[in-house]
Image (cartoon, rainbow, N blue to C red):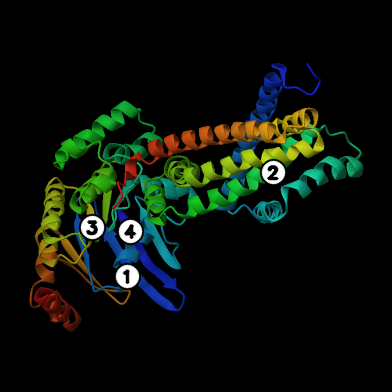
Amino acid sequence: MRYAEFTWFDLVLLAQGLGVTLGLFLATSLIGLLVGSAWAVIRFYRVPVLTQVVTFLAELLKNSPVLVQLFLIFFGVPAFFRINLTPVDAALITLSGNTAAFVYVIAVSAIESIGRDQVEAARVFGLSRWQVLRHVIAPQALAFSIGPLTGLLVNQLQVTSLISVIGVLDLAKIGNILNLRTLKPFIVWTAVGLLYYLAAKAIAYLGARAERRLRAHSAWKGL
Amino acid sequence: MLKAESVRKVFGTTTVLDGVDLTIQPGEVVSILGSSGSGKSTLIRCINGLEKLDGGRVTVDDFDVSKPRELAEARKRSGTVFQLFNLYPHMTAVQNIALAPIEVLKRPRAEAEAEARNLLASVGLADRAEAYPAQLSGGQRQRVGICRALAMKPRYLLLDEVTSALDPEMTAEVLSILAKLAAEGTTMLFVTHEIEFARTISTRIVFLDKGKLLVDLPTDQFFAPAGGLAQPRIAQFLTKMRKD
């Protein structure tokens, strides 16, 4: 057997890469969802100063390439602040921030889509602003945004492949290593692409299921 | 006692309420009549604290609506039914009604929901308890709206053109419930265009015109030739409304 042949161990490598990709995806999505929603709430309450900061930050993150943000965090921040960042740290920070910025945009439009009249009704019956947010706004905003959020997350899964350039051993990086060793790009990248595809389909499936449940109250059967 | 004293409200350059005085004692049913834009709905919104006053004072059982600390108490004492229902679309009829009792009055969920079902049964909607607003007709939605206000056991019920968005048949459904409430002694402030109905259930009628309170008379006097009808503006309004 030549060194360049595929071995059974390569499947373990691919599985490991997929694990790193999914792990980072889940962690950054969770952080991004929490941070992005918190930013939207800050804007909803029109918190002075913080609202401006959040809007500016989201604009910055939305309108620059993730790759540039990644390089800035991985190479720029350690050099400037004299701290150490592992590739995984840098990937976590960059991807979470990027997801947060887009979650923020979706959450803001979802909150704005909710009729003011219901909010007034809830206030008149004595609910506090927090109770209105929790019981009237949040559930409807979530139902409204689950579609766009699913789309965003599917996209963010693909975006994780960028972190391979700073040396994180994710699925794309493993693909690169296998490709260089076997020199069989068609087979390697087909396998890698298929794994991304299946993961994306799983996210879309879960999103669609959640959407059906959250939108039970407005079950629209179509024309 | 619900009291508005020289209430003023300005939107931009328009004065919508111009020194309105109104007192409602427990047990009274007071109807507010007046043409569109006369300030009727704004008066309700000033009483339940949805609009900031530009002058004057509103108190509900001596709790001042303009003071943030007292607003919550004032709001516990008055319940509002809205023209366009304003139900929460993601909640069933029962959940719509039980939300405020659970969250504001801290009632146990099971108890609040059981009471919501009783209220729904009392307005003939026992079988629609688990329906979402989108699955209900306009009249049914407004009946849920009334139950939602009643669930808070308010001392004063504020009704803001509650039948304006309904067809005559649905209007009748809703009015019969209001008549029942009035007969039970519920205190109501009733903004409406249903003049004949106002005449049958009200103890007093108030007429608003261009933000000013033109008359405030017991019902029989309001409709008497020497009372409200003596005012040309009111005579004109009533003739116009009856023709339509």
Q: Which amino acid does label 3 sit on?
A: Val
Residue B104, horizontal then vertical, whole percent: 40, 38
Gap between marks 4 and 1, in whole Å? 17 Å
Which residue is located at x 53 percent, y 44 percent? A151
Give the residue number, with chain letter if any, for mark 2.
A97
Gap between marks 2 and 1, in whole Å? 49 Å
Give the residue number, with chain letter if any, for mark 3.
B162
Residue A37, horizontal then vertical, whole percent: 58, 43
The earlier-in-sequence mark between 4 and 1 is 4
Looking at the picture, tell me which residue is in the foreground, B206 or A98: A98
Looking at the picture, tell me which residue is in the foreground, B231 or B210: B210
Quarter of image, res B20: bottom left
Which residue is located at x 88 percent, y 40 percent? A78
3 and 2 marks on the same chain:
no
Give the residue number, with chain letter if any, for mark 1.
B39
Tags 3 and 4 touching, CB below 8 Å: no
Q: Which amino acid does label 1 sit on?
A: Gly
The earlier-in-sequence mark between 3 and 1 is 1
Q: What residue type is labelled 4?
A: Lys
Gap between marks 3 and 2, in whole Å? 48 Å
Gap between marks 3 and 1, in whole Å? 16 Å
Q: Which amino acid does label 2 sit on?
A: Gly
Gap between marks 4 and 2, in whole Å? 53 Å
